[in-house]
Amino acid sequence: MLTQSPNPIKSSPKISLSSNFSASNTFSPLQFPNFPSKPKTLNFKLLCSQSPTPNPSAPPSSSPIETLINVLRIIPDWADRTQERGMRQRRTLYDHEKWMQHRSSYRHLRHLLSSLSSRVILSLIPPVIVFTLVAVVIASYNTAVALDLLPGFFPLLRSSSLPYQLTAPALALLLVFRTEASYSRFEEGRKAWTEVIAGTNDFARQIISSVENSGDAQLKKALLQYIMAFPVALKCHVIYGSDIGRDLQDLLEVDDLLVVLNSKHRPGCIIQFISRSLQLLKLEESQRNMLQSKISCFHEGIGVCEQLIGTPIPLSYTRLTSRFLVLWNLTLPIILWDDCHWIVVPATFISAASLFCIEEVGVLIEEPFPMLALDDLCNSVRNNVQEALANERAIHARLAAKGKIQSEPQFQNGQPRP
């Protein structure tokens, strides 16, 4: 208990050690009297007067609005994750068996049964659910108004179908042009990779047939490794989430791989390795220039791929198509109410699923490279080069034997040919 000082204080307000005390205040401006030294009691009162310090590790309290937003985002976030997993799936090249399955008469049943595993359909679940719920709300409201369950000043939501008949061709043209533009980008990316793969195979063939000096054996082997590594580096450059270290560890030596990984532009670094290796080979100048010209297809492939990745379809066109679709499906229950009544719910569901599915396909193929079987294309280059190296000695021996036979004098009817 605090005792009073011997010198009485003149009438002054009582000193209160309440929550108004803060650590930034000092005792000097308040001019407290001299209390007896009882630090334990005084410290106890000061600690009790301070507000508790919040625990930084405790999760922040979220408002009801934030909680509602997080709940509403569960399905869209799940749909986006499903779509991105589908984009990272490995594509394979078609063979005869896959083409037979592709044109089989059972394909329609197979496609229908696999609908729930289609990433296109799964990504459309959020918008289709929203538009279907809007149709349910509008149908319920109109039913309540028609049954006089609401006051008379509530109007019935209905309208003429003439505006839809006039704007339907415009929506169809938007979707067709959007999908066609996306397919053009897909076709351009496919052609670019066809030229890259063909140029890589031709370049490797030229190296195998041109470099015959035994002193360049190690350099020739390294050069072929760089040529095989270029498509892999370009594939990792254009596909998000690729592990270039894992893909190149069987093609490049450790020191070369470290140089490639430390560079900002990995395909360009591979081209530098190729150019420098050509300069070190013991070749004639004309032959070296001919091999250097083969690198131009690599630069063209990089340019086309980077252009497709960095430049999408004009965003104004994409936004216009999306807004048109949203407004169309939002107002569809009002337009169809007089003719369909509660059938507007399944009609809106079918309309939203069909139209948004077409638009979604256009969005997916707008980025063409995840749709291509780039892993199989890179593996085909590697297999072709390895097969060419394995056949090189056998082919060379056979041709040398044929040349030796042709160089010998030939006889006809036991007499030398004149």
Image: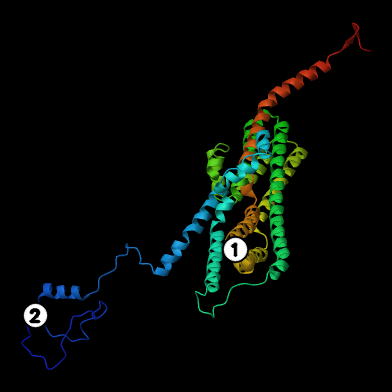
**Residue closest to the eye, 12 or 25:** 12
Give how far across and how far down residue 9 sits, in percent.
11, 91
Q: Quadrant of the C terminus?
A: top right
**Residue farthest toward the bottom in the current orientation of the protein:** 11
Say above or below: 340 vs 302: below
Element assignment for label 1:
helix
Q: Quadrant of the N terminus?
A: bottom left
Q: Earlier in the sequence, mark 1 or mark 2?
A: 2
Residue 325 placement: quadrant: bottom right
**Label 2 packing within 10 angstroms: few (<14), some (14-19), many (20+):** few
Let me know if residue 42 appears in the view. Answer: yes
Q: In the image, what residue occupies the spot 67% across and 43% down?
A: 275
Colouring: rainbow
**Residue farthest toward the top in the current orientation of the protein:** 414
Residue type at mark 2 is Leu
Give how far across and how far down residue 264 sits, in percent.
57, 52
Residue 280 placement: quadrant: top right
**Residue farthest toward the front in the current orientation of the protein:** 147
Marks counted in the figure total: 2
**Label 1 packing within 10 angstroms: few (<14), some (14-19), many (20+):** many
Task: Give the number of the disc on residue 344.
Answer: 1
* Circle 1/circle 2 CB separation < 8 Å: no
Q: In the image, what residue occupies the spot 18% across and 75% down?
A: 46
Give how far across and how far down residue 256 sits, in percent.
56, 41
Residue 319 left/right relative to 414: left
Element assignment for label 2:
loop
**Residue closest to the eye, 219 or 389:** 389
Q: CA distance from mark 1 to mark 2?
A: 81 Å
Q: Which residue is mark 2?
A: 2
Q: Nearer the viewer, mark 1 or mark 2?
A: 1
Let me know if residue 269 appears in the view. Answer: no
Give how far across and how far down residue 265 sits, in percent.
60, 51
